[in-house]
Amino acid sequence: MNTYFSLNFQQAFTAEIRQNILPFWMDKMPDLQNGGFIGRISGDGIAHADAPKGAILHARILWTFSAAYRIFHDLKYLDTANRAKDFLLARFWDTENGGVFWQLGADGTPIDSKKQIYALGFAIYGLSEYVRATGDKEALEKARELYYSIEKYSFDKAKNGYFEAFTRDWNEIEDMRLSDKDANEKKTMNTHLHILEPYANLYRVWPSAELKSSLRNLLGLFLDTILDSSTGHLRLFFDENWNCKSRITSYGHDIEALWLMYEAATVLGDSDLIERVKAVVPLIAEAAKEGLQPDGALIYEKDEATGHVDNDRHWWVQAEAVVGFSYAAAITGNREYAEIAQNCWKFIQEKLVDKEQGEWFWSIKADGSVNRFDDKAGFWKCPYHNGRMCLEMIGRINVPELQ
């Protein structure tokens, strides 16, 4: 995979992750009293040691620092990955029913024990990356256990796809939402995307026939059902029969899905699937372009039903735009996509990076001001999107810069 960035960009991405992103999480987030990581640093930089701890946060820290160790071989990164892995397995793991708890109190006791499949997916993602970095057998076994739990309890054998959430003991649950802003539907694009992502990573270290079948099926769902071929956007919410229940466009998820779908197809090594994904890359990239702004950033989302547009420039959307449009440039040879990625990277450096306290702000508002209301670190604000952006770009920069 090539992009149109040059070595000076590679050095900039390396500096960003090693001098800004990773040190923030290593220095400010470990919970030295209760283990794992503290649950929250607010937008004004204040640490809240009493905040609940999220499975998503710990799984994403595990992925990020495992990947960083695999690339840079720095033992400090392995230490942080070990802290995340140990706490995930010791405190989030449900030894009675399997799976991981959604949320713990600051002291590490469960306060929300539901089984959100999204969280199980990220636990697989983190554990499988730890396996890639270390060869750890325990992490591989736990990742496989989570895979089997998802397939046993969440997979819809009648109508395909995966149900969102369950009670602690895998019974039906009334509220299946990831967050308050989501629709309470049985199947979502977001959860399927973040099953596709960890299944592909797990396949790298466990290329079993059953996992291969699951991954192929997921890609087929994205190509045939979740992707709206008439618009190039991803449909977000569905009932159990795959009837679409939303008209919201999420530009960040569009561009993130573009490259995660291609990654999954290439990990499988399936030439037919690779060609099918390559064929829709321009469609998705052009759809995502609809959210681009003159400042180089990609806005959050649009509700097609009401016409309401969320013009904030969220941190994760910009990170995925850099990676996704770089993939699009490499796959299609269209240099415009590389320019889009470069312009977004420039926006990140000039606006989103917190040059005083480290890491990135949650978002830049439509009026250009910094959003200090939302967390700097917390349940959803993790080092995974921006850290992964840097690692992806470092690994794919090997062709001349745009002139």
Image (spheres, rainbow, N blue to C red):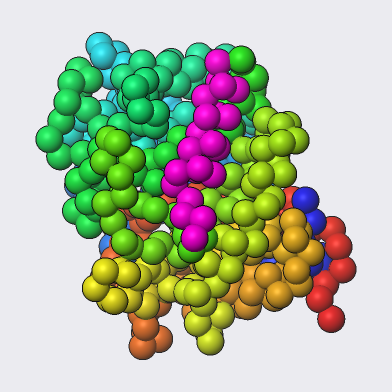
Secondary structure mainly formed by the magenta segment: helix
Extent of the magenta region: 210-230
Residue 168: image x %, image y %?
20, 23
Where residue 67 sits in the image (x, y, percent)? 61, 40
Residue 10 visible within the image: no
Picture quarter with the C terminus: bottom right
Q: In this view of the protein, which residue sits in the foreground, 292 or 44?
A: 292
Q: Residue 273: where, in percent of width, then height?
A: 67, 37
Q: Position of residue 285 (x, y in %)?
A: 59, 64
Seen as rendered, the residue at the extreme right is 400
Residue at the image point whose x is 39% and y is 32% from the top: 161
Of residues 246 and 325, the one nearer the viewer is 246
Question: Which corner quadrant of the image does residue 329 belong to?
Answer: bottom right
Q: Nearer the viewer, residue 18 or 205?
A: 205
- Residue furthest front as drawn: 230
Who's the residue at 26% across and 45% down the image?
178
Instruction: Evaluate whether residue 265 shows in this view.
Output: yes
Determine the residue positioned at 65% across, 19% down: 207
Answer above or below: position of 18 versus 73. Answer: below
Q: Is residue 213 magenta?
A: yes
**Residue at position x 44%, y 46% in the image:** 226
Q: Quadrant of residue 131?
A: top right
Q: Is residue 183 magenta?
A: no
